[in-house]
Image (cartoon, rainbow, N blue to C red):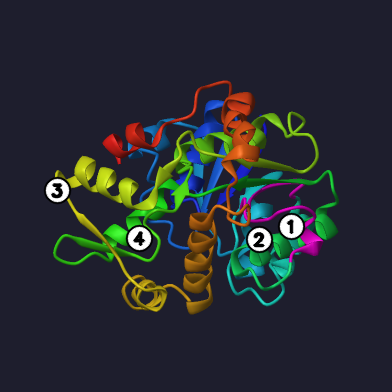
Amino acid sequence: MVKVIIFGATGAVASATACAAHAWGASVVLAARDTTKSIPALTPEAEKNGSYQRVHADLTDPETIRHAVTTTNATRAFVYTVFGAPDHMRASLEAMRSAGIEHVVYLSSFAVKGEPGSVGPENFIAYAHARVEVTLNEVFGSSGYVAVRPSFYATNIRWWLAASAEGRVGMAYPEAKFDLVVPEDIGRVCGTLLAQGSSVVQGNFVNLLGQEELALGDAARLLSRETTGQEVEVVTVGEEEEIECLVAKLGFPEPLARAVVQQNREQSLGLGRGLVDFATDADYARNVHRITGSQPTAFGEWAQQA
C-alpha cells in the first residue's frame, strides 16, 4: 500500500485530495500545523475507521517536514504554494526529498503559461507558482513531480461575499467570465495522481478548467442565493476600492490583491491575455474525467452543497 502525506490537510483542496487518495487504496498521512483542527472533507468516524494518521508539519519549517516524513515513511506528497517563501520553497522541498519523498503532486495555477522558467515577476500569482515548479524540477527531476494547474476556483467567489456590506457586493469587473472549478474536483485529480501515479499525464503538468463560463457577478448572486437564501446587489467599484477591500477585510497581501484585480481586468477585456481563453482552452475541462474517470461538478451543483 502506497503511503502519501498531505500537507495543509485542513484546507479544502488538500482534504479532498486526502479522501480521493484513500479511496484509491492509499494510506494517508494528514499533515497540518494544528493537528486538532477538523478536516473539511473527512468525518471523524471516517478518519477513525480508515487508513489515516495525523502528524504535525509546517511547510515553512523544513525540520517539521523532515520529521513528519521520516516518522511516517511516506513516499509521495501533496504540497501547495507558500506565498512569500524567499527560496521558493527549496528548503522545504529538499527536506522532503532527503526524508524519503519520491514523488510530489503540486497544487500550482493555470496562470502559469508555457515554460515555468520564462514566467516573469510582473504576474504575482503566475510567478509564485512557476518558481516552485522550477524548484521542484531542480530538486526532484522532471519525472519526480506533477503540477496540477487549476483555473479560477469556485471558492474564490466567497471573497466578495465575505467582504460585502448590507447586501451589496462590490466588484471592479463583475462582468469578467471565468470557469469556476470546484475544490472537490481539484482534490479528486490530485488524490488520483498521488495514489495511482502520474503516468496518465503527458509531461509534468495538467491544466484543469471548470464546467461553466459564468460572470463573477452572476456567480456571486447564485452562491448567495443557494447558501443563504438572500439576494445580493452587485455594484461596480473602482480597482483601488476593490484592492483596499481585499487587503483590509480579507487580509490579502497587497501584491496578491492587485494581481487578482489585474487578472479580472484582463479577463473582462477578452483579448486573450486573461486567465482563461474559452475559445482555445475548452478541452482542459475534460481533464477531471480523463484522470479520475468520474464527471466534474458544475458550479450551480456545488453552490447547492456549499
* Amino acid type, callout 3: Gln
Do labels 3 and 1 touch, CB within 8 Å? no
CA distance separating discs 3 and 2:
36 Å
Q: Which residues are magenta?
A: 101-119
Whether 85 is drawn above or below 184: the answer is below
Compared across the picture, whether 6 is left or right of 169 comes to right
Compared across the picture, whether 305 is left or right of 277 comes to left
**SS category of the residue bearing label 1:** helix
In the rendered image, residue 7, in percent from the top left (x then y), is placed at 56, 54
Q: Circle 2 sits on which residue?
A: 129
Q: Circle 3 sits on which residue?
A: 230
Choose mark 3 or mark 2, whichever is in front: 3
Quadrant containing the N terminus in the rendered view? top right
In the rendered image, residue 62, in percent from the top left (x then y), is placed at 66, 68
Look at 72% across and 74% down and name the residue there: 87
**Mark closest to the chain's N terminus, 3 or 1:** 1
Q: Which mark is residue 159?
A: 4
* Amino acid type, callout 1: Glu
